Amino acid sequence: MTQNIDPIVLNFLYAFIGGLMTLFFMWLGCYVLGRLNCTFSIPDELAKGNVAVGLMIMGLFIGVGTALGLVIGLGLN
């Protein structure tokens, strides 16, 4: 099926689907982390300006984004 699609369109389709997957897995990671951590609420601490929680979420986003980016990028062979 993919032989009939222009490679440029196919790459944009892969990038779009990969972006949606990345956003979903970042949301899922924050959700699971919030459920596992009962001592504080992530949204409340971010609203208070807690830098440590912000850095923790930043690390989660970078890790998930890098992992999915590598999977999607290596799948474009």
Image (tube, rainbow, N blue to C red):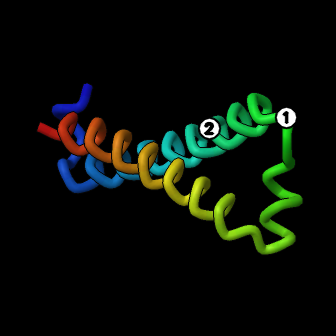
Location of residue 38 with respect to 7 vertically, above or below: above
Disc nearer the start of the sequence (1/2): 2
Q: Left or right: where does residue 52 sit relative to residue 68?
A: right
Label annotation for residue 29 = 2
Which residue matches tag 1? 38
Asked whether 50 or 35 is in front, the reply is: 50
* Residue that protrudes farthest toward the bottom in the picture: 49
Residue 59 appears at what percent x and percent y? 49, 54
Residue 16, x across and y down, in percent: 44, 51
Q: Residue at x 21, y 34 (%)?
A: 75
Query: Quadrant where the C terminus lies?
Result: top left
Identified by mark 2, the residue type is Gly
Question: Residue visible at 26% across and 25% down?
Answer: 1
Q: Secondary structure at mark 1?
A: loop
Residue at the (62%, 38%) spot, across then down: 29
> Which residue reaches farthest top?
1
Disc 2 packing (10 Å; few <14; some 14–19; many ≥20): some
* Kind of residue at badge 1: Cys
Using the numbered discs, state the Cα–Cα distance from disc 1 to disc 2 in whole angstroms.
15 Å
Q: Nearer the viewer, mark 1 or mark 2?
A: 1
x and y percentages locating residue 3 in the rendered image: 16, 32
From the viewer's side, name the closer residue of 48 and 72.
48
Residue 39, picture quadrant: top right
Find residue 76 and report its image quarter.
top left
Residue nearer the viewer, 7 or 36: 36
Residue 7 locus on image (x, y percent): 18, 48
Label 1, residues with CA under 10 Å away: few <14, some 14-19, many ≥20: few
20 vs 18, left or right, is right
How many labels, in total?
2
Q: Which labelled disc corresponds to residue 61?
A: none
